[in-house]
Image (cartoon, rainbow, N blue to C red):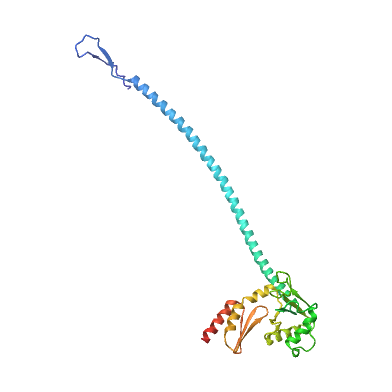
Amino acid sequence: MPTKPHPKTFKSTKPTDGSSSPTRLTSSNTSEEDTISSGQILNAIHTMKEDFVSRFDGLLGAIQGVQSELKALTGRMTEAEDRISTNEDDLTSMKTQTSTMKAAMDELVLKVDDLENRARRSNVRLVGLPELTEGGDVCNFLEKWIPEALGEMNFTGPLLIERAHRVGRINSKNGNQQTAARPRVVVMKVLNYADKVRVMKAGRSKGKILVDDKNVMFFPDVSADLLKRRKVFDSAKKELASLSNRDLRYGIIHPATLLVTIKGRRHTFDTASEAEAFVQELKSEQS
């Protein structure tokens, strides 16, 4: 059964000071104020809802934008990884090819150097011969002078020189050959290789050969690269020369190997470090 609304009740208020002012009637139910407050609350909630929806839509749009960018970035990273993988494969292949080409090039360089040295097999380098000693005909002078200087008994027949010349410019400030501080090297090509061997052996056994009080020496003619490879043993050869041992002999054998013979035993060294270590052992044994 529905409840009946309570009738409005009114209270009469009289002034307490005893004055005769009219009485006021006060309502005990403030329904109008409650209605106004509820409307404001609903409006506020509606406004907050609209604001929340607006902000949420913006946030959702921003998230969707980030997702799109992330997707695009992921695609780029995948493409970059594929390219990097392809480049790494290509680089590995190129490294293999480079190593193969380098090995082939090194082999070709050795072959070219060997061919150059073979072409110089019959050549002899004459160091220390004073300038103008040979006159106008170098070959004719050497064919007569070498047997006389090294001994006729070392040659079975006449020495034939195919060609000969001095190497480089004159080492003099005024260009005068007679005042050159250091005579230029003479390079000669002996027609017979056996004669070249006889010249080198006789030159080693002869010792000092003097021309106008200048020491003249015979050396084999080799390429610049081979000469550089042989020079690494200079320090070890000096140390060996300082040792007082009659049973010790040493020299360079082709192409660039140091041969040391001591008490009939032969020792070969392909690197300077090995040779120097062996020399130190010999020094320690002597001490």
* Quarter occupied by residue 96: bottom right
**In the foreground, 4 or 121:** 121
What residue do we see at 51% from left, 38% from top? 62
Question: Which quadrant holds residue 175?
Answer: bottom right
Q: Position of residue 240 (x, y in %)?
A: 59, 83
Residue 278's x, y, as percent? 56, 82
Left or right, residue 129 beside residue 282: right
Q: Nearer the viewer, residue 145 or 5?
A: 145
Q: Which residue sits at x=63%, y=63%? A: 95
Between 202 and 86, the one lying in front of the other is 202
For the point 27% across and 14% down, the residue is: 25
In the shown orientation, is residue 20 left or right of residue 208?
left
Residue 266 at what x, y percent from top left? 61, 86
Looking at the image, the residue that sits furthest to the bottom is 153
The percent coordinates of residue 68 (x first, y second) are 55, 42
Nearest the viewer among 253 and 62 is 253
Q: Is residue 18 above or below residue 84?
A: above
* Numbered circles on residues, count: 0
Q: Residue furthest top?
A: 20
Looking at the figure, which quarter contains the N terminus?
Answer: top left
Task: Look at 80% across and 81% down and name the residue there.
Answer: 140
Task: Tell me the quarter of the picture where residue 151 sits.
Answer: bottom right
